[in-house]
Image (cartoon, rainbow, N blue to C red):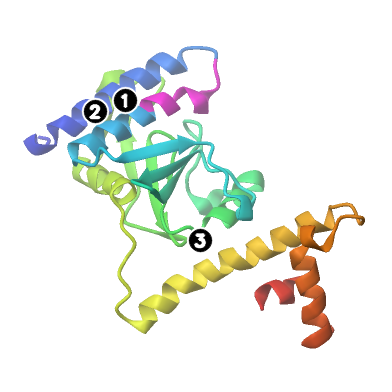
Amino acid sequence: MADARLRWLQEAVSVFGAECKRNLLGPGDREAAIRSPLEQLLRTIAAHHARPEIDWFPETRIPHLGVRPDYAVRVGKDVTGYIEVKRPGKSVDPDSFTGHDRKQWERLRDLPNLLYTNGTHWRVFQYGAQIGEEVVLMGALKSAGEKLTASDLAAFDALAQAVLCWDPPKMRRVSVLVQHIAPLCRLLREAVREQLRAEAGLNTADSKADCPFIGLRSDWRRLLFPTADDATFADG
């Protein structure tokens, strides 16, 4: 029997299932069909945990990564996480990703707080490492309707809170600091390479002010490392 304290969550999951079933019976895109029910489910969970200041913004581009997750989660004025939605039935296991999904994952994996879901399967990643176990909602979204239920309501609640109520960890040890700086450095390195590619596409008549990283790369090669390629420059 489900924990009576989590009855509210089962009711929210049932509403989510009913709305997904209704939307998926239509002719529209399957991924888009579950987004509105997903927003309502997350809104209910956030309200239950007294976090009304939480908002999420669709199609939020991360310019330096050249990628656009489906949602950015914002608490107050700070973006604290991202949500990537896949169509029902599509895998959310990064080990199975290929093509576009693989390339997207490689750009998103170093984010500090990331949720992947296809509506029934839910995984949270922090700096590329999965946090906790995958949570599964039992039933097919197109047919389960209000009978949809979580395999473990407590685990599902904890997973949702990991995304909606996440706070950056306090750095009390050098080892922890290094662990968290490493992925941020990888993000910065990719941002530099992305900017170099963008500047390379500009007209050669553009001013140096429009190409600051190309200018910096030239100075780097002239003064420090004459043989440094773009990857070495970005890494440095």
Name the image quarter holding the N terminus. top left
Q: Which residue, given by chain and number where applicable, does mark 3 sit on?
A: 110
Residue 114 vs residue 6, the one in the foreground: 114
Q: Is 198 one of the magenta-colored residues?
A: no
Q: Are marks 2 and 1 in contact (CB under 8 Å)?
A: yes
- Local crowd size for mark 1, using a 10 Å CA cut-off: few (<14), some (14–19), many (≥20): many
Tell me the amino acid under the disc marked 1.
Phe
Q: Is residue 228 visible?
A: no
Dots 1, 3 in contact, CB < 8 A: no
Q: Under tag 3, what secondary structure?
A: loop
Query: What residue is shown with label 2?
Result: 12
Which span of residues is magenta-colored? 28-37
Left/right of residue 57 with respect to residue 133 in the rendered view: right
Answer left or right for 204 relative to 142. Answer: right
- Distance of mark 1 from mark 3, alpha carbons? 30 Å
Q: Nearer the viewer, residue 235 or 94?
A: 235
Residue 109 at x, y percent in the picture: 51, 57
Mark 1, residue position: 16
Mark 3 residue type: Asp
Residue kind at label 2, given as amino acid type: Ala
